[in-house]
């Protein structure tokens, strides 16, 4: 992975809040392989989008870990939901980083396909799937920066953290990555 330029980091925003209230083109869902909904951010997205989202997901028939599928967003204030299945954390030696990276890359590919200019991600795998928050930031942020350095769309990516504690961790990791990528 090459070092992203300063302008790429400026296309990544970190914020804190409920992703179902975010206004933009697409949000990413931290789903499970059934795509039929669950707890955490998945439950919140399905509740806010309404039952037609679950119907569309049922017709897709599931998703592999590390892959992503795109649906409509129904009652949500975005145009698309991109459902990705993060890895369960098993200590870090079972390919978790590559799978988490693939989740982000596949989600951005599906967003770019439909011309989504603004995309928001939750901190995939850091809830029920147990991925440590700082490790998740170290997996997600360079992958997104690398994708953005190669593609003009999406123009902006937001990471919607669900607590100020998580936001602080992601901010620290982002600053470290920016420093590391300076020439
Ligand atoms: N907006 C933004 N972030 C949220 C929200 C929200 N409304 N709600 C929770 N988070 P998790 P996972 C954060 O457990 O670890 C589900 O049951 C949360 O604090 O939602 O990938 C699925 O069906 C955490 O930081 O997803 C799967 O079975 C992050 O979102 C399984 O959980 C991810 O936590 C997926 O587990």
Image (cartoon, helix red, strand yellow):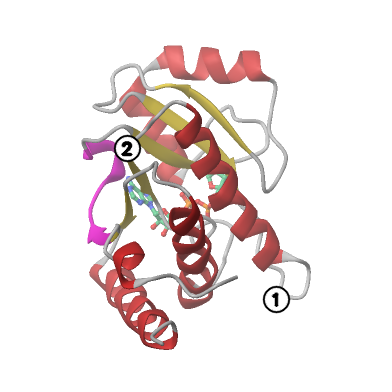
Residue 145, numbered circle: none
Q: Where's residue 109, x and y in %? A: 54, 39
Secondary structure beneath label 1 = loop
Task: Report whether 40 appears left or right of 20.
Answer: right
For the C terminus, give its image quadrant: bottom left
Contact between marks 1 and 2 (CB within 8 A): the answer is no
Q: What's the residue at 39%, 45% (across, down)?
A: 152
Secondary structure beneath label 2 = loop
Between marks 1 and 2 in the image, the one whose residue lies nearer the viewer: 2
Q: Where's residue 164, x and y in %? A: 23, 69
Q: Residue furthest right?
A: 94
Q: Is residue 61 above or below residue 52?
A: below
Report which residue position mark 2 lands on.
117
Q: What's the residue at 43%, 54% (across, down)?
A: 148
Q: Where's residue 83, x and y in %? A: 53, 35
- Write down the region rendered in magenta: 13-22
Q: Is residue 31 visible?
A: no
Q: Is residue 145 above or below residue 116?
A: below
Report which residue position mark 1 lands on.
91
Residue 176 occupies quadrant: bottom left
| Front in this rendered view, residue 149 or 62 | 149
Q: Residues within 10 Å of mark 2 (few under 14, many from 20)?
A: some
Is the C-beta of the residue carrying label 1 under 8 Å from the nearest atom of ligand 1? no
Query: What is the spatial separation of the Cα atoms under label 1 and label 2, in whole angstroms?
Result: 35 Å
Is the C-beta of the residue carrying label 2 under 8 Å from the nearest atom of ligand 1? no
Task: Report whether 54 appears left or right of 24.
Answer: right
Task: Report whether 98 appears left or right of 141.
Answer: right
């Amino acid at each position: 992975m090459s070092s992203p330029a300063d302008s790429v980091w400026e296309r990544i925003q970190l914020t804190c809040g409920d992703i179902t209230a975010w206004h933009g083109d697409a949000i990413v869902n931290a789903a499970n392989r059934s795509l039929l909904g669950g707890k955490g951010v998945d439950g919140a997205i399905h509740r806010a989008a309404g039952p037609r989202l679950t119907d569309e997901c049922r017709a897709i028939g599931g998703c592999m870990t590390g892959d992503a599928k795109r649906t409509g967003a129904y009652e949500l204030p975005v145009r698309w939901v991109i459902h990705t299945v993060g890895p369960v954390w098993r200590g870090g030696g079972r390919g978790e980083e590559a799978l988490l990276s693939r989740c982000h890359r596949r989600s951005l590919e599906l967003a770019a396909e439909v011309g989504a200019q603004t995309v928001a991600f939750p901190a995939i795998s850091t809830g029920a799937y147990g991925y440590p928050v700082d490790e998740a930031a170290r997996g997600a942020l360079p992958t997104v920066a690398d994708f953005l350095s190669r593609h003009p769309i999406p123009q902006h990516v937001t990471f919607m953290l669900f607590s100020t504690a998580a936001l602080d961790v992601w901010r620290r990791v982002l600053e470290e990555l920016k420093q590391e990528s300076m020439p």
